[in-house]
Image: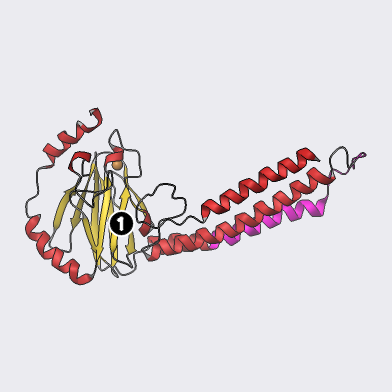
């Protein structure tokens, strides 16, 4: 009995800590220490993903609870001491049908909303503007084809150049500025190897594949600064190609477009910076 109590105590402690940790909220639009839950959603796509995740959490918790209950009954009632003469039953047709059909029903219940979200997050609902992203080893290129062809490259701010308010490994020299409440079509490709453009708060993670253009869309619903990182291991400086998006109101975006057209009229040659970054890993 003592060992059984100990096992039960361990199981309940594990569950208790899991529940406690899952209650710690992730409050920032960036990775945080000990962050366990999602970053708060800032787009309709992320909202749908979070709702689906929460639904799955209820289903999986019920399944885990049920299996734990069955295991506990087996451990307590059918151990050698409590059940000296074991039963010889090996088959039960009804039981076997039930434990096959119920999981199938559960999978169908999960599949329906899952496919719905895949479709909704994939299909571009009347795009109002386009952002084209190109992944390079190891930086990002951005183009705004319908905003006068603004285009620029975006590099991580190096540790020794970080200014107040910038974040190590997350801030970039040129930030992506996007308007809120706008359906943004995202076109993603790469120039060398496979990268992946990701902003967790937008619910977007899409591979950037050479010779191929992947597309998705999102609609940001609150202004703010959002961070992401390349999410496909793309070489030695994979860690050093973050994404920084500033979501602003439509008026602020128009003002930025006017400034950006002048500022990015001729951007720096990418060659120099590529060389500079090639040294980064050797420091
Ligand atoms: Cu990459």
The residue tagged 1 is 226
Q: How is the image coloured?
A: secondary structure
Quarter that holds the N terminus: top right
Q: Is residue 274 magenta?
A: no
Taking 211 as reference, is 95 left or right? right
Position above or below: 196 against 47: above
Q: Position of residue 102 (x, y in %)?
A: 69, 57
Nearest the viewer among 159 and 260 is 159
Q: Which residues are magenta?
A: 84-112
Q: Quadrant of residue 235?
A: top left
Please indicate, yes or no, whether residue 211 appears anywhere in the rendered image.
no
Q: Position of residue 179 (x, y in %)?
A: 24, 66
Quadrant holding ligand 1? top left
Residue beneath the point at 24% across and 52% down? 133
Residue reaching furthest to the right: 85
Taking 181 as reference, is 73 left or right? right
Nearest the viewer among 36 and 207 is 36
Count of numbered labels shown in the rendering:
1
Badge 1 local density, few (<14 within 10 Å), some, or many (20+)?
Answer: many
Nearest the viewer among 5 and 218 is 5
State whether the magenta stretch is mostly helix, strand or loop: helix
Q: Position of residue 222 (x, y in %)?
A: 32, 67
Q: Is residue 86 magenta?
A: yes
Residue beneath the point at 15% across and 51% down? 152
Position above or below: 240 against 213: above
Quarter that holds the C terminus: top left
Q: Quadrant of residue 56?
A: bottom right
Nearest the viewer among 253 and 234 is 253
Residue beneath the point at 45% across and 64% down? 48
Position above or below: 128 against 70: below
Q: Position of residue 53 (x, y in %)?
A: 51, 58
């Amino acid at each position: 009995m003592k060992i059984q109590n100990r096992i039960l105590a361990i199981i309940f402690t594990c569950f208790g800590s899991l529940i406690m940790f899952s209650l710690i909220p992730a409050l920032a639009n960036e990775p945080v220490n000990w962050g366990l839950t999602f970053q708060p959603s800032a787009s309709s796509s992320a909202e749908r993903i979070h709702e689906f995740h929460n639904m799955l959490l209820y289903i999986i918790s019920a399944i885990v609870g049920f299996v734990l209950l069955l295991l506990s009954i087996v451990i307590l009632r059918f151990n050698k001491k409590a059940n000296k003469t074991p039963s010889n039953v090996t088959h039960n047709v009804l039981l076997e049908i039930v434990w096959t059909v119920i999981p199938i029903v559960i999978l169908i219940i999960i599949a329906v909303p899952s496919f719905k979200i895949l479709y909704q997050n994939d299909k571009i609902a009347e795009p109002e503007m386009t952002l084209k992203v190109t992944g390079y080893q190891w930086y990002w290129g951005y183009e705004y084809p319908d905003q006068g062809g603004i285009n620029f490259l975006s590099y991580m701010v190096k540790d020794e150049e970080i200014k107040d308010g910038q974040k190590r490994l997350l801030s970039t020299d040129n930030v992506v500025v996007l308007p809120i409440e706008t359906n943004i079509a995202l076109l993603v490709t790469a120039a060398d190897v496979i990268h992946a453009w990701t902003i967790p708060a937008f619910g977007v993670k899409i591979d950037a594949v050479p010779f191929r253009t992947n597309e998705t869309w999102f609609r940001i619903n609150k202004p703010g600064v959002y961070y992401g990182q390349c999410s496909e291991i793309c070489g030695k400086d994979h860690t050093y190609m973050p994404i920084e998006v500033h979501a602003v109101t439509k008026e602020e975006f128009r003002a930025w477009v006017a400034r950006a057209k002048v500022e990015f009229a001729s951007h720096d040659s990418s060659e120099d910076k590529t060389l500079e970054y090639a040294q980064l890993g050797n420091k």
